[in-house]
Amino acid sequence: MAAPDLSRTPRARRRRGAIGLDWFSFFLADVQTCFGPFMAVYLTSEKWANSDIGLMLTVGSIIGLAGQIPAGMLIDATQRERLIAAIAVACVGLSALFIALSSRFLFVILSQILHVAASVCIGPALAAMSLGLVGHSHLGLRLGRNAQFASAGSIFAIIVMGGSGYFLSSQAVFFMTTAMTIPALLALSLVSSRDQYHHRPINQQNAPYSVVSALRTLATNRDLRVLAIGVFFFHLANAGLMPLAASIITMRSEQDATILVALCLIIPQLVVTASSARIGNRADVSGRKPLLLCAFAALFLRALLLGFFREPVAFVALQIFDGISAAIIGVLVSVCVADLTEESHNFNLALGIVGAAMGLGAAASTIIVGDLADWAGAPVAFISMSIIAFVGLIVVGIYLPETKPEIAVD
């Protein structure tokens, strides 16, 4: 008699799915890393003007911001998050390949549009697969593991792609990015669609998805509005800090600027890698709000202290606070959105709305910080951002209730 195939049991499939999400998060970070500073390095080496690079990045930012809500609608309407994630990853790989093959302006702009349009679908698809695999009661730990593996993947990609760019060429980074989509898709194949919970009521399973009804439901969700306002203030206070700090480090320590700025980028990633899973587990056990308040408090202290310190080494040390706040926000925002949409079942659309609020805050932050620094000096800009972070802390502290369900069901 043949032995039973234990790999086909629901528990074994879920274990495989959890491993798949771990490594999908890891390799997804590898795939996305080249579209940051490495893109600017490559285009500069190809004799692009700074204005053209800025235009390309601006186009990407606008599309990324505009695509948040439609991406959420798409995933909620189709409930095919695994397929959408696979297509999106393949498109990101193709966009990297196209950029590597040609650095002509129109070609790169179109590739950037493809990359951003695909990327806005990946984040909510990953969150939806995570919710589908573990349900609401263990979502914090699951998203914490996603963030942990993604941060480790970012560190790995920075080292490997930085080495490739140094020893080979900046173009090689984009070929490597394309290659990294293969293990990402293999990891995704471990996630079985049969093990995905779809949290729609039974009487709605076959009902057509109504965008108008979903938007109307979310518009009346007071706590979701408070969360969106809170994270808007968080990113309004946060996004402009590192670019200004990097400029100051470069001016005050020109010889060691590259190393110090690299440390500013790596330290938060190390903190996220070390703490995300613990934060997710703590959120599942003890609640969401205390951790959210800690994130705002860490941002407030970082911005305030940046306004008083002058030494570049101190700027690097303060990035520990950035890692703490990034780890908490990276996990807790999606968990809170899942809590607040458990009854309405519009998780991905709500996540898109909150993501749009985050994007708006980040876009405004870099402009405001730069203008304040030019007008009144860097210390005033940093302290102003600390005030904005404190406002966000007050909004969340007073108006956002604890979103963790009182009774968790496995």
Image (tube, grey):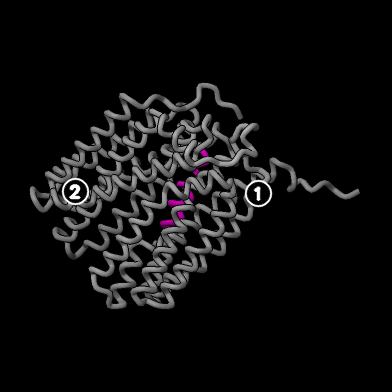
Question: Is 147 part of what is drawn in magenta?
Answer: yes
- 3D distance between C-alphas at marks 2 and 1: 45 Å
Give the extent of the magenta segment: 141-155
Residue at 46% x, 31% y is 340
In the displayed image of the protein, which residue is found farthest to the right? 1
Tell whether label 1 touches label 2 (CB within 8 Å): no
Q: Residue at x 8, y 48 (%)?
A: 376
Say left or right for 18 vs 297: right
Q: Quadrant of residue 299?
A: top left
Front in this rendered view, residue 325 or 399: 399
- Image coords of residue 195 (percent x, y): 66, 43
Residue at left offset 28%, top offset 50%: 363
Q: Is residue 355 magenta?
A: no
Q: Earlier in the sequence, mark 2 or mark 1?
A: 1
Q: Is residue 372 above or below residue 203?
A: below
User: Which mark identifies residue 368?
Assistant: 2
Q: Which residue is mark 1?
A: 192
Question: Of all residues shown, which one is farthest toward the top?
Answer: 406
Q: Give the number of the mark in front: 2 or 1.
A: 2
The residue located at (51%, 60%) in the rendering is 89
